Each structure stands twice: as structure tokens, then as C-alpha cells.
Image (cartoon, coloured by chain):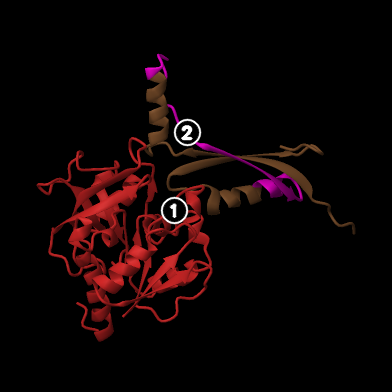
Chain colours: A brown, B red
Amino acid sequence: MEATIPTQYAVQIRVTPRPGILDPEGETIGRALGVLGYEGVSDVHAGRLITLRLAAEGADAARATAREMCERLIANPIIEDFSVQVEEASAGEAR
Amino acid sequence: MRFAIVRFPGSNCDADCERAVVEGIGHEASYVWHKSTELRAVDAVILPGGFSYGDHLRAGAIARFSPIMPAVIEFARAGGPVVGICNGFQVLCEAHLLPGALIRNRGLRFRHVEVTVRVERTDTVLTAACAPAQRLRLPIAHGEGQFVADDRTLAALEADNRVVFRYVDARGEATDAANPNGSQHNIAGICNEAGNVVGLMPHPERAIASLLGSEDGLVLFRSLELSVAGAVTGSST
């Protein structure tokens, strides 16, 4: 039996404040946009984007590992939601 | 009586805590590096303030996985007094020893002011020497001290009397104006169910002599002393 060679995946993790949790950063950005004269702006939220490369045996495995990383460290489920996007990294691509 | 003060890379209130223990209440304090895996024979553990691991990701999020933390968690579960001050409070929340979370202050500003807090219960390891509803003048110094929890957790905290300190005004009222960071219900500190793990945002270790502007922090260190003495003699009620 052949050993499986892990594939490199580009993982994007988006962490956003949970709805209902105060988001002082989003509120402040929204206020500043108002000061600049932008009208009709509402629901501004600020989150965080984390990108990483992950060697895994298949996209499902990569996704499962990334979700586990989020639950354990990258997001705090009390105040944050997260979403994970996984795609096969093209060879030689830096980011 | 021996106090352990855990040092994370970025802790910066460790020496103040040591002074508070040694000079404030006349006991021994030893530093425990975050890479240690054991606390040895100590009577109480303090997680000091600072910016552990540069506050990267979230305040306290990385410190929570330090090699020393399993020993701290075990000590807490066995009933040992554990106090988290400021960044230490954030670490306790991230480690799920305390519920809720501490997010950016309302208004995004780092707040460095003296506040008044009201002691909400006197049967915790940190408030055993306080008078009921005693008001303390203590400094705060934080950018991420806004206590938040979901409605159910918040209701449970109130129902179980687990709010230990609340920001109040000069008349002792928990008003919005007295709330320096937007914390829900003006919460400045909470405890676990047993009352042996307490986290608070204000810095009692910076208020141990009138020269520092306030000595109101001393009563909290005396409370720790009282709690440990009570546990040792088994006369705790």
C-alpha cells in the first residue's frame, strides 16, 4: 500500500464578534465613517482574518483540523464566531 | 504562608504583587515561571497583571496554554485560593476557571484611573476580611476590561451571587457614569461557585500604602491570609 502524501492547503479563518456581543471596535469605526460624511452606514463589525498553510490528507481533514484550532485557541466561542475556508494551495504560491 | 506569583512573558505587576504579600501582609512570595509544571507547596496562587504573550490574539488566550496552567487549574479544583488580577483575570476566563470574557473597553480607550468598587460578598478568599458592601478605592489600568457574558451566564452569576466587586460612584451606586469600561452590570470582579477562584480588573497590589494614593488593596491581601489560615485550621465557616 502506498503512503499518502499530504497535500498543502491554504486555510482562511475569519473570526467575528458574535451577534449580540458588544463590538466597541465596530461601533467606533461606524461613528468615524459618519464623521467623514458617509450616510446610511450601519452594522459595522470588526473581526480578524488569519491565513495559514496546512499539510493534510484531504480537504475534509484540513477543515476539521482548522475548526479544532479555532475552538481551542483562535476564537473564543463566548464572544466570537468563526468560519473556515480551505482550498488546495497552488504550488509555489507564497500566500 | 507561601504565595506563588506566576510569571508569564509580559507580566508586569508580578513585583508589585510580591511587595504586597511580603511588605503588605508579611508572608513569603515566590515567583513561578510559566514554563514550570508544578507549584510545589504553596497556599495561594496569584496570576498578576501585565500583557502576557503581548496580548496577541486575545488577552490571556495564549497564557492559558502555558505549561504551568494545568497545575494552577488542579490547585483551583482542589479548593486552593487562586486570584487573577487584570491580565490574570483574563487568563482565568480564557482557561474557563471563570465564566464570561473581557473585551475592549467601551470607547476603545486604555483606562488608567482610580475607581471605587463595592464588595458584593465577603465569603470569598479575596474578600473574607472585608465588611459587607465595603467600598474600596483601587486603580484600574487596562484596555480590555469590559466584562461580557451571554444573558444566561449573566443571570446565573447574579442569581448565585458570584459578582464579587462592582464599579460604583461616590454614593455607592452602580451607575453607568461609574462604569469605566462598559462592563455588563458594572462587574469589576467575579468568583467561581466555591468562591476560591476570584478574578478582578482593578489592581489591589497598587494600593497598599497611602503613599501610592490608597491602601484599600491591603484588605484583599489580608482576606487571602485569613482564608488560608481558616483552611489550615479547619475553622472556616
Residue at the far left in the pictured view: B171
Q: Which residue is mark 2?
A: A46
The quadrant where residue B129 appears:
bottom left
Q: Which numbered marker is on residue B33?
A: none
Give the spatial CA distance, label 2 vs label 1. Answer: 22 Å
**Image height of B177 relative to B44, above or below:** above
Query: Which residue is farthest front?
Result: B211
Report whether B6 appears left or right of B229: right
Mark 1, residue position: B51
**Tag 2: amino acid:** Ala
Most foreground residue, B80 or B209: B209
Residue B236 versus residue B135 in the image, above or below: below
Measuring from the top left, give residue B126's x and y in whole percent.
Answer: 25, 66
Residues in magenta?
A: A35-63
- Residue drawn at x 76%, y 50% is A57
Q: Quadrant of residue A79?
A: top left
Report the quarter where the C terminus of chain B lies. Answer: bottom left
